[in-house]
Amino acid sequence: MQILRSPRLALAIGAFVCAMIAIVGARLTTPALIAPMAALAPAAIAQAGGGSQVTARFISPTGSPSRHPILSGAEQLDEPVRAQIARAVAAIPGVAGVRWSDGDMLAEADVPIINPMHCQEDVQALLRARTIRFEESSARIDAASLSLIDEVAAALSPCLGAIIAITGHTDSSGPEPGNLALSRERADAVRAALIDRAIPADGLRASGMGSARPVEGLDAADPANRRIEFAVLATDPITPTPVDKPGPR
């Protein structure tokens, strides 16, 4: 009785008891909630092209029942099929989010799966007719190319969350150590310009190749080798992700 005369201690005990009731209740009810989702998953996977090789385990990384299934067994399937499977499982009523066991994708029923090649192709289309130009012997982007940088940023924006490689190239004029340094500085300048246009910095990788990789069919000394190339290496579309959902790799 003396213990209960302390309001703070009584509140602490009450909170502890409520927490234990909630934990026990969750452990008793979660399996019942998960069972219908797990029963529907095999058919959804098969219909999406996963056959019987892809499985969905409705468990958390710690082994507890979870509405965030982990998919596995699709290592030999191409990305479009993997995307279809993830979307099909995410569409099952009650499923809160889906991820692959290799951490390759996060999918939800209302999140579009974006093909990173679309972004790369859009950028390449922009750069076929125009070139990002720099001031002579400098990494400063020419003012006339700033509008092209705007368009490149717009083309890349659907793939926010992707790893985007920015590679600078030069022709073979001048000593190669200087070419390497200049090509990297120019790639860094383009990276900085894209960051200024709201492309996330952590997804941009800049490098310089100097004159080591001329355009196919061109002599290494041809000025047309002075260029910036982009490659979209991977994608995990950025969406607001509640803290209880597994994040992309």
Image (cartoon, rainbow, N blue to C red):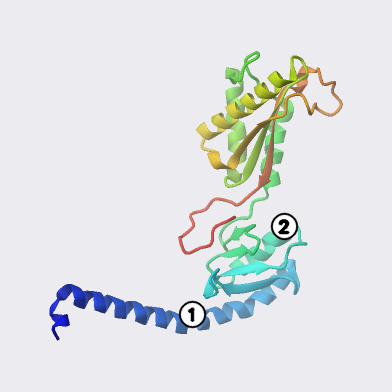
Residue 76 left/right relative to 11: right
- Badge 2 amino acid: Pro
Is residue 94 in sight in this rendering? Answer: no
Is residue 96 toward the left or the right of residue 50 in the image?
left
Tell me the CA gap for discs 1 and 2.
32 Å
Q: Residue 196 location, x and y as percent?
A: 51, 32
| Residue 107 rendering spot, x and y as whole percentages | 59, 60
Q: Quadrant for the C terminus, please.
A: bottom right
Read off the residue under disc 2.
80
* Identity of the residue drawn at 66% across and 32% down: 207
Q: Residues within 10 Å of mark 2 (few under 14, many from 20)?
A: few
Q: Is residue 27 above or below residue 218?
A: below
Which one is in front in this view, the residue at disc 1 or the one at disc 2? 1
Q: Which residue is mark 1?
A: 30
Q: Earlier in the sequence, mark 1 or mark 2?
A: 1
Image quadrant of residue 90? bottom right
